[in-house]
């Protein structure tokens, strides 16, 4: 299994993500009786390793809409790595209820997806999370969308909606021609159905409080 280790060294939140991943893999190994070797590589090399046959699967947070679905198989969603909606403490609205309201987000590959999905929301952009925080504190905007690694900065003073906004999850990917990983993908689906997967994710505290 190939993965980019730099995705898990930013802060305590990503460290928890790595701990969660390690426990998922350990549980998977125990359940199917196969050892999973981790191969470290930069994000832009993962697909080449997979398509070249050097690894059987990769662990990535590439959004499904960015991948060629006819080429890859995706495991069950494992760890969310998109953005969360942050509003004032007494504001229970989500994006569906923020028509014509100002919502700030980072200008990245997810921005166009969100703008297309919610055309009635008045989206604006911010460059740094601290700048977005200031805008929200002054009620210049109704909400901000922050990357999952930063949501804990806002939990005490604001409401972080625990619902996932985008389709960006860490998960296993395999080429459709590689059948060696069938047992692992089926076991992940089983772990999701039985609640084992959610229990591990809750244990590591990598999602906002409901």
Image (cartoon, helix red, strand yellow):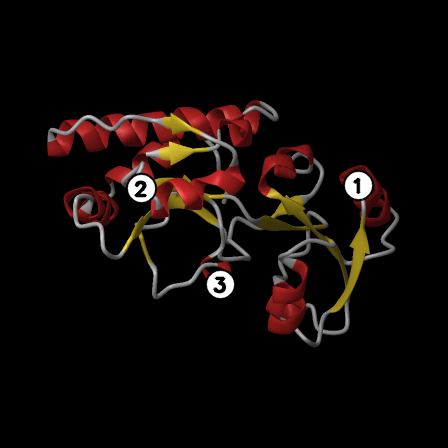
Residue 163 in percent (x, y) is at: 51, 53
Residue at 66% x, 65% y: name it. Answer: 112
Q: State which mark lies toward you, 1 or 2.
A: 2
- 112 or 101, which is in the foreground? 112
* Mark-to-mark CA distance, 1 and 2: 34 Å
Please indicate, yes or no, whether residue 172 appears anywhere in the rendered image: no
In the rendered view, would you say 66 is above or below 16? below
- 183 vs 149, left or right, is left
What residue is shown with label 1? 128
User: What residue lies at 25% left-to-right and 43% top-to-bottom?
Assistant: 195
Q: Earlier in the sequence, mark 3 or mark 2?
A: 2
The residue under label 2 is 57
Q: CA distance from mark 1 to mark 3?
A: 26 Å
Q: In which quarter of the view is residue 7 placed?
A: top right
Q: Position of residue 129 (x, y in %)?
A: 76, 40
- Read off the residue under disc 3: 65
Q: Residue furthest bottom?
A: 120
Q: Residues within 10 Å of mark 2 (few under 14, many from 20)?
A: many
Picture coordinates of residue 147, whole percent (x, y): 63, 44
């Amino acid at each position: 299994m190939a993965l980019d280790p730099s995705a898990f060294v930013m802060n305590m939140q990503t460290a928890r993500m790595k701990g969660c991943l390690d426990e998922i893999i350990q549980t998977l190994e125990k359940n199917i009786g196969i050892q999973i070797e981790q191969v470290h590589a930069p994000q832009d090399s993962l697909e080449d390793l997979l398509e070249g046959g050097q690894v059987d699967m990769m662990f990535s947070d590439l959004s499904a809409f960015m991948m060629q679905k006819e080429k890859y198989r995706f495991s069950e969603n494992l760890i969310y790595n998109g953005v969360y909606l942050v509003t004032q403490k007494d504001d229970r609205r989500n994006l569906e209820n923020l028509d014509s309201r100002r919502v700030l987000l980072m200008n990245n590959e997810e921005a166009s997806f969100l703008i297309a999905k919610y055309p009635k929301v008045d989206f604006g952009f911010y460059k740094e999370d601290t700048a977005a925080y200031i805008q929200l504190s002054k009620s210049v905007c109704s909400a901000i969308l922050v990357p999952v690694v930063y949501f804990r900065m806002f939990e005490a003073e604001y409401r972080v909606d625990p619902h996932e906004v985008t389709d960006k999850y860490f998960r296993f990917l395999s080429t459709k021609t590689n059948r060696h990983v069938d047992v692992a993908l089926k076991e992940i689906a089983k772990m999701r159905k039985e609640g084992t997967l959610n229990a591990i994710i809750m244990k590591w505290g990598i999602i906002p409080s409901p």
